[in-house]
Amino acid sequence: MRTGLGYDVHRLAPGQRLVLGGVEIPWSHGLIGWSDADVLLHAVMDALLGAAGLGDIGAHFPPGDPQYKGISSLKLLERVGGMLTNYGWKVGNIDVTVVAEQPKLRDHVPAMCHNIAKTLGVDPTDVNIKASTSEELGFIGREEGMAAWASALIEK
């Protein structure tokens, strides 16, 4: 068994789509990035890649590469799952904390867990997502961005 830790952060801007855990969430602001800027899935991918000793998502899906412009992070997660399988790894469990002042995410968490579990071929009970705020402190508290941390356990 091996564990990995992932972290990601993206800026918020008005008029952008907000996608977290593969779920499009209606809100006036969205995250800015080369792909769909799904901060939650980016942290998950980094945790999985780190656990397997396979680097990070920037090494596999570099920003600026035209083939990844606007791509769904669920597609990238599917590729990461394939990499793990090719190296003989399977996902044990994933735990994520996403930090955002707005919008409230609680009602979207079950769909996010379902998306991750389905994409990686694991049971939804193997995926846990928590939503928190920064109590109005820092760039997250000022609603300038969002961050996510993820841990993953993989096993042969």
Image: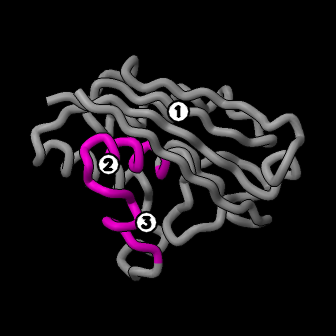
What whole-number distance in Å separates the C-alpha atoms at marks 3 and 1? 21 Å
Question: Residue 28 sits in which quadrant?
Answer: bottom right
Mark 1 and mark 2 in contact? Answer it, CB < 8 Å: no
Q: Position of residue 106 (x, y in %)?
A: 67, 27
| Secondary element at image label 2 | helix
- Residue assigned mark 3: 71
Within 10 angstroms of label 3, few (less than 14), some, or many (20 or more) residues? some
Amino acid bearing label 3: Ile
Does residue 62 belong to the magenta stretch?
A: yes
Q: Quadrant of residue 125?
A: top left
Q: Is residue 15 visible?
A: yes
Q: Residue furthest top?
A: 125
Which residue sits at x=55%, y=40%? 149
Specify the amino acid type for callout 1. Answer: Val
Figure quadrant of the N terminus: top left
Circle 2: is it few (<14), some (14-19), or many (20+) Cα within 10 Å?
Answer: many
Q: Is residue 156 left or right of residue 120?
A: left
- As helix, strand or loop, the secondary structure at mark 3 comes to loop
Q: Whole-percent x and y of residue 139?
A: 81, 54
Q: Residue at x 34, y 33 (%)?
A: 3
Q: At numbered mark 1, what does the secondary structure look like: helix, strand or loop?
A: strand
Quadrant of the image occupied by residue 12: bottom right
Q: Nearer the viewer, residue 129 or 109?
A: 129
Tag in front: 1 or 2: 2
Q: Quadrant of the C terminus?
A: top left
Q: Which residues are magenta?
A: 42-63
Q: What residue did someone put label 2 on?
A: 49
Tag 1 residue: 96
Mark 2 belongs to which amino acid? Leu
Mark 2 or 3, closer to the camera: 2
Pick whichever, 125 or 96, lies toward us: 96
